[in-house]
Amino acid sequence: MLFRRRRALACRQAVELMTDYLEGALPRRDQARFEAHLAECPHCSEYLAQIRDVIAAGGHLEPDDLPPEAVDDLVTLYRTWRTGG
Amino acid sequence: MRDDDADLVHRLRAGDEAAFAALVRRYQAQLVRLASTFVPSRAVAEEAVQETWLGVVRGIERFEGRASVRTWLFRILVNQARTAGVREHRSIPLDLGDEAAVPPGRFDGSGEWAAPPAPWTDEVEARLDATALAGRLADLLPELPPAQRQVFTLRDVEGMSAAEVCEVLDLTEGNQRVLLHRARSRLRGMLEAQMGKV
């Protein structure tokens, strides 16, 4: 357990729970405590928003363009593989 | 799993060249992207992917369809890339150790923020555009330790589920989550530093 039961969550602990929270992996009581902390802490709320921004940015990464000859080259190789090359 | 993946595999079993080409078009870029997290050069990464396709063609008879085509493909790739990584002396055993999401100096003695994160908003208080951040993020990914980069790439870039990532990378759910947490934390910190907002 990263925090004591009788005390509210500290920011330093909250930042370590961000991924568990987003994954839905926090036990219900810890999740409630985490959300209660966020409700009172604009800094940790901003931090969570930044983690979400990182995730969203990741989803916007385009793979490098595939040069058309890459497919052709592999198909040519495929023919040799199929004939037992 | 996309239905047409299974269809392509079915046709590939019958030696359908167009099905092979379709699979390549669908997955080549993603495979190279993941391979690049295991080996130091793009050329070696592309070789590992080429070996992967060879493995697919040779192993297609044995593919039973219990895993999705994508999972199967990426597992072959990971095996190839890890082998290539060993050859290139890049294989680093997984050692999770300790890593704080934020340097402890950012907090005061009672664990509250001493140097809180400045908002990532523009002049009108809107969140910064994800596509703008994406450009910066692309340059920062190679700075991550390989295992963190692999998990982040598969989870947050390729959009794979946690379960599939665990299968592809042969990780426990717990380890996968720790690596994801650290990757996201590091990237946030690097972006923050880059934006001069520390």
Image: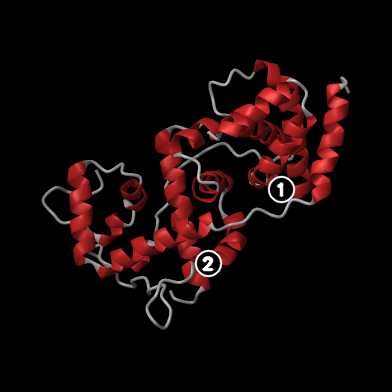
Q: At label 1, which amino acid type do we have?
A: Pro
Percent of width and height locating residue B72:
60, 28
Percent of width and height locating residue B3:
56, 32
**Chain under numbered label 2:** B
**Which numbered disc covers residue B40?**
1
Percent of width and height locating residue B111:
25, 62
Indicate the secondary structure of the residue bearing disc 1: loop
Indicate the secondary structure of the residue bearing disc 2: helix
Above or below for A54 versus B170: below
Q: Which one is earlier in the sequence, the residue at label 2 or at label 1?
A: 1
> What residue appears at the point 57 percent right and 36 percent down from the top-left corner?
B93
- Cα separation, mark 2 vs mark 1, equals 25 Å
Question: In the picture provided, is B49 more to the left or to the right than B198?
Answer: right
Please tell me whether mark 2 or mark 1 is closer to you in this view. 2
Mark 2 residue crowding within 10 angstroms, few (<14) / some (14–19) / many (20+): some
* Residue, disc 2: B133
Query: Are discs 2 and 1 located on one and the same chain?
Result: yes
**Chain under numbered label 1:** B
| Front in this rendered view, residue B153 or B16 | B16
> What residue appears at the point 37 percent right and 49 percent down from the top-left corner?
A19
Mark 1 residue crowding within 10 angstroms, few (<14) / some (14–19) / many (20+): some
Number of numbered markers: 2
